[in-house]
Image (cartoon, rainbow, N blue to C red):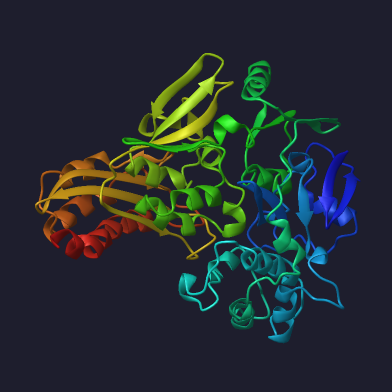
Amino acid sequence: MVELMINGETRRVPSAAHTTLLNALRGQGLTGCKEGCAEGECGACAVLVARADGNGTRWESVNACLALLPALDGAEIVTSEGLGTPAALHPAQEELAVRGGSQCGYCTPGFVVSLAAEYLRPERTPGQHGEANGFDVHSLSGNLCRCTGYRPIVDAARALGTPGDGDPLAARRSQPAPRPRATQLDAADGVFHRPATLEDALALLAAHPDARVLAGGTDWGVDVNLRRARAAMTVAVDALPELRTFEVDGDMMRLGAGLTLSDLERRLKGRVPLLREWFPQFASRLIRNSATLGGNLGTASPIGDSPPVLLALEAELELVGPGGVRVVPLRDYFTGYRQTVRAPGELIQAVRIPTPLAPVTAFHKIAKRRFDDISSVAVGYALRVDGGVVTQARIGLGGVAATPLRATEAEAALEGQPWTADTARRAARILGATGTPLSDHRASAAYRAAMLEQSLLKFHWETAQEVSA
């Protein structure tokens, strides 16, 4: 059994090791939470989760289809049913209704939850994101609607004001959020552990090297749903304090591997321009509210979006295990398709980014959709240009080989050369021949090579004036 606070009521909910929050809620009669895709792309299953925000609470929207129920033991959840009643609609529900934002209604509960999360965002102020009410319309990028069309939904978002004094969820923000609790669940489909300490986690992983390490679950949840994957043991590490650090000193930024991407984005406050450009292009707000750097790097996917930017930033990884902590440059971390130097029993503890940062940067993501999609090709750039000459070039690539990689030959072709169109063209030809791209349902090998070449030409076009100034 798992204990949850759901819509203000404490419930003990039956759970197996791989039960999703979505299925558990529907089993409790809360059928507003729906399965549309089972992989976190449609948002029909969105719910609010109370997360710690200093000494208070932040309401964040997450995909219930990807969240394993045992990982939420002790959590506080609000579903679309808990936002309002037919006699007293929540402002998000009311605005969506009066502006014609619902037709068949299947996607509506998820949209309502995402609208409510942004409505309750404490930093929202008039004028933010170019909107009079400060509403970030991209907070809805993880919600899909197939029949209404988005204009009336966006109209509802733009009509939302600020929470009134009587709004119970707004008032709840000043109170502490539930802390993740140590959990052990033994079930027929496996064992689930949330260890209380890093020492306990490492001991479990040392004893069970094949255990599934769980952070945000946005990748593993897809395997659980669509491939019926099951782990004999799952060890949740996202709440460990050692994996949730955030430090900025004179020559290093240290980003905890267990912090969600949304949390990192807020803490960084735009001080890393390359990451500032990258964050909105990583899946959707629903995913970024759960996904972590440690999880994205831990999967070692060749099309993960974080490696290209982190390679360009010359990031290092702290790997912690029974023997202590060792530091590995990210360029040396990947050894083969979904293979890394991380030893059994080790965890990614933090990502280190050296400072000062290269001033000329960009992230280019080529995908079928502008947002909430998997990359066909991803490129991170970080250049230092002094007196019009490239003194250092770092280029990280994803989607063009069995692993993410540095484009060292293209970097060498740039370094020591003037940052001109001719230099960019010469280096672009080299970049286009980098890696061993494959043809698949996302893109052909020829297209991927062409996009690499065009990406560098675009980067020069975007930055030439900035550099000459």
The one of 310 and 340 positioned closer to us in this rendering: 310
**Residue 146, image x, y percentages:** 66, 75
Give the quarter of the figure containing the N terminus.
Answer: top right
Q: Is residue 314 above or below residue 146?
A: above
Rendered image quadrant of residue 194: top right
* Residue 46, picture quadrant: bottom right
Residue 287 drawn at (x, y percent): 60, 53
In depth, the one of 222 and 32 nearer the eye is 32
From this view, report whether residue 22 is shown above or below residue 205.
Answer: below
Asked whether residue 45 is in view, the answer is: no
Q: Is residue 52 left or right of residue 246?
A: right
Camera sees residue 390: yes
Q: Identify the residue at image location x=46%, y=42%.
A: 302
Q: Nearer the viewer, residue 255 or 409?
A: 255
| Residue drawn at 50 percent across, 52 percent down | 266
The residue at the point 48 percent across, 74 percent down is: 127
Residue furthest front in the image:
165
Label total for image: 0
Q: Tell me: residue 439, above or below residue 327.
A: below
- Left or right: residue 28 versus residue 400 is right
Q: Is residue 410 above or below residue 43?
A: above
Q: Residue furthest top?
A: 323
Q: Is residue 388 left or right of residue 449?
A: left
- If the image is split into quadrants, where does the C terminus sit? bottom left
- Percent across and percent down for residue 425 are 17, 57
Q: Residue at x 48, y 70 (%)?
A: 128
